[in-house]
Image: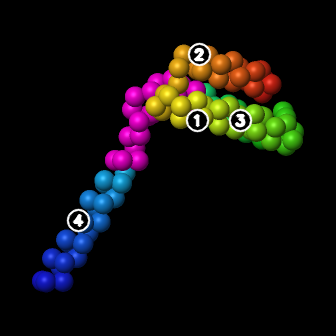
Amino acid sequence: MKLTIQTVLAGLGAATLLAAAGASHAETNWQAHHPRRVEVNHRLANQDRRIDNEYRHGEISRAQARDLHAEDRGIRNEERFDASHHGSHLTRAEQHHLNRQENQVSRQIG
């Protein structure tokens, strides 16, 4: 009986730690409070899927896909840099600039 209680308590302790870690990871500042970053990052994720899809269907070459992914990485890095200077959010001007860059990449995807 003693072994069972210890096992249950250890399991509860582990579950509590996992729940706390998951909650802190799930609700970062930008996810909960900064829709401009969310919008920019959703567009980047969508473009990433589109690039992969066109490559799989033979519509673009491996080199073209690599270059487009590199452009998207550059936009994502710029988004992170901008957000790091404004308390984890983007200004409207920054969002507009990033959207224009995403539009240019989107036209290249097809």
The residue located at (75%, 21%) in the rendering is 104
Q: Residue furthest bottom?
A: 2
User: Which residue bears the numbered disc 1?
Assistant: 80
Q: Earlier in the sequence, mark 2 or mark 4?
A: 4
Q: Could you give the CA–CA distance between mark 3 and mark 4, rounded to whole angstroms?
A: 43 Å
**Label 4: how many Cα within 10 Å (few below 14, some 14–19, many 20+):** few
Q: Earlier in the sequence, mark 1 or mark 3?
A: 3
**Label 2: how many Cα within 10 Å (few below 14, some 14–19, many 20+):** few
Give the total number of marks visible in the rendering: 4
Amino acid at dot 1: Arg
User: Which residue bears the numbered disc 4?
Assistant: 12
Q: Which residues are magenta?
A: 23-41
Q: Is residue 10 above or below residue 21?
A: below
Local SS, label 2: helix
Residue 32: percent from left, percent from top: 39, 32
Disc marking residue 74: 3
User: Which residue bears the numbered disc 2?
Assistant: 93
Q: Could you give the CA–CA distance between mark 1 and mark 3, rounded to whole angstroms?
A: 10 Å
Q: In which quadrant of the rendered image does the N terminus lie?
A: bottom left
Residue 65: percent from left, percent from top: 80, 38
Q: Nearer the viewer, mark 3 or mark 4?
A: 3
Q: Is residue 26 magenta?
A: yes
Predominant SS along the magenta part = helix
Amino acid at dot 4: Leu
